[in-house]
Image (cartoon, rainbow, N blue to C red):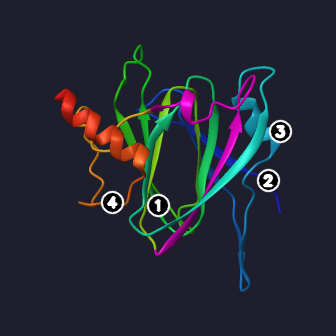
Amino acid sequence: MSFSFDIQESKLIKDLWIIKVDKGVDFRGDIWTSFHKDYLEKLLPSGLYFKHDKFSTSKKDVLRGIHGDDKSYKLVTCVYGEILQVVVDCRKESKSYLKHEKFIINEDNQILLLLTPRMGNAHLVKSHKAVYHYKYAYEGEYADVNEQFTFAYNDERIGIDWEIQKPLISQRDLLATEQDHTKGH
């Protein structure tokens, strides 16, 4: 099986890379490659490489994000289940500042997204359960929660239609929502 990827830059958000994987499918199921250094690290700045991976498992109606930081490149996908993935351009100097792009990721639409620094990452679980994969590249140490930014998932300036009224959100995201409403955004 080959390690082929169809790599395209988003037409809406510059520097957001959409990567379609080549799946092998037979009577047993499917197999696909989520990372190959020769293909995907060429999208990173010279000298930068992927350092670590994280997984999150969430149940239906869990909404994670909108989170990001100033230095991390994130290669993300859903490896099990179905999610509504949203990427928000949080780069103030960008022509697409606070614009977002939505993707359904599942076994029938297996894509990876490469987000560059200052892009907001969020997803809503549409299936009974989903497993989400993050692969990180950055200089220095990992930018943990205290170095990350958070936008409210329902920030009116961004205007995301999440197709759900009451998602399950973390305390961090709840605080961002309450702060956003008190600012009158």
- Which disc is residue 3 wearing? 2
| Disc 3/disc 4 C-alpha distance (Å) | 38 Å
Which residue bears the numbered disc 4?
167
| Residue drawn where x is 34% and y is 46% of the image | 174
Do the CB atoms of the residues marked 2 and 4 lie less than 8 Å apart? Answer: no
Q: Nearer the viewer, mark 2 or mark 4?
A: 4
User: Residue 152 at what x, y percent from top left?
Assistant: 33, 39
Tell me the quadrant of the picture where the N terminus can be found. Answer: bottom right
Q: Which residues are magenta?
A: 128-149
Q: Mark 2 and mark 3 in contact (Cβ < 8 Å)?
A: yes
- Place of residue 39 in the rendered image (x, y in percent of width and height, measured from the top left): 77, 40
| Count of numbered badges drawn on the protein | 4
Of labels 3 and 2, earlier in sequence is 2
Query: What is the three-letter code of the residue carrying label 3?
Result: Asp
Image coords of residue 22 (percent x, y)? 69, 59
Ranked by sequence position, the earlier of labels 1 and 4 is 1
Return the residue at label 1.
83
Q: Residue at x 60, y 47 (%)?
A: 76
Residue under the point 29% across and 41% down: 177
Residue 124 placement: quadrant: bottom left
Q: Quadrant of residue 69?
A: top right
Callout 1–callout 4 Cβ contact below 8 Å: no
Amino acid type, callout 4 = Pro
10 Å crowding of disc 3: few (<14), some (14-19), many (20+) = few
* Cα separation between marks 1 and 4: 13 Å
Labels 3, 4: front one = 4
124 left or right of 75? Answer: left
Q: Is residue 126 above or below residue 123?
A: below
Kindly tell me whether residue 112 is visible in this rendering: yes
Which residue carries the number 3 mark? 38
Which kind of residue does numbered mark 1 sit on? Ile
